[in-house]
Amino acid sequence: MNKAEKTRQFIIEKTAPIFNVKGYSGTSINDMISATGLTKGSIYGNFRNKDEVALAAFDFNLKQMFSAVQAEMATRKTVKEKLLVYVEIYENFLTYPFPEGGCPILNTSVEADDTHPELRAKAAEAIFTWKTKIENLIKKGVADNELSAALDPDEVAITLIALVEGGIMISKVTGKLQYRRAIMKAVKKMIEAL
């Protein structure tokens, strides 16, 4: 990695938590300067604009999130155990190497759905990627006779994502952790019934 690539990566790593906590519109150039210790010219010498930094920060946060999930799944044997990782991590995400501020898909989706087409597209792509990963797990479970052949992998995957993300959103907005726990309990029952 050359010096310019190292500087870009440094900027991404330092600003990613800010974008994930404050959102695109809430993150200012002064926030980026404070986080990196670089000047405005240095930041925009490596990125064309705030959009480019935000898109790279989203990718970084998403990779961090998927890596935390994948690392936990690698320690599990059955498909159900792997699916239950979502419950475990999202119920206790502060104890995992998860992006600061929580799920970047949820955070970005809520903010960018009507305001930032490029970030919205990134969030939508992340949902489709996540859905495909779950669908593949479901298909493997069916092929291994661990899960019911009557399952619709697409339906199970998108429902699981909606419940997990919805549980986090409701809990964050209301400040009621018991709501997240209750929804994760329902997700666990759903997975165990597969």
Image: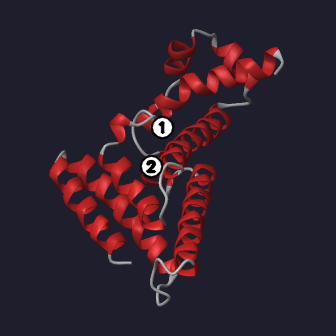
C-alpha gap between disc 1 and disc 2: 8 Å
Q: Which mark is residue 148?
A: none
The answer to whether residue 45 is visible is no
Q: Are marks 1 and 2 in contact (CB under 8 Å)?
A: yes
Which quadrant would residue 63 be assigned to in this image? Answer: top right
Please provide percent x and percent y for residue 67.
Answer: 56, 43
Mark 2 — residue?
111
Q: Locate the C terminus and report the quarter of the image it occupies.
A: bottom left
> The residue tagged with tag 1: helix, strand or loop?
helix
Mark 1 — residue?
25
**Relative to 68, 189 lies left or right:** left
**Relative to 95, 55 lies left or right:** right
Could you tell me which residue is drawn at 36 percent across and 60 percent down? 164
In the foreground, 25 or 154? 154
Residue lying furthest bottom in this view? 150
The answer to whether residue 158 is visible is yes
**Relative to 93, 19 lies left or right:** right
Please provide percent x and percent y for residue 186.
Answer: 25, 67
Q: Locate the N terminus and report the quarter of the image it occupies.
A: top right
> The residue tagged with tag 2: helix, strand or loop?
helix
Please provide percent x and percent y for residue 191.
Answer: 36, 70
Residue lying furthest right in this view? 2
Circle 1: residue type: Ser
Circle 2: residue type: Glu
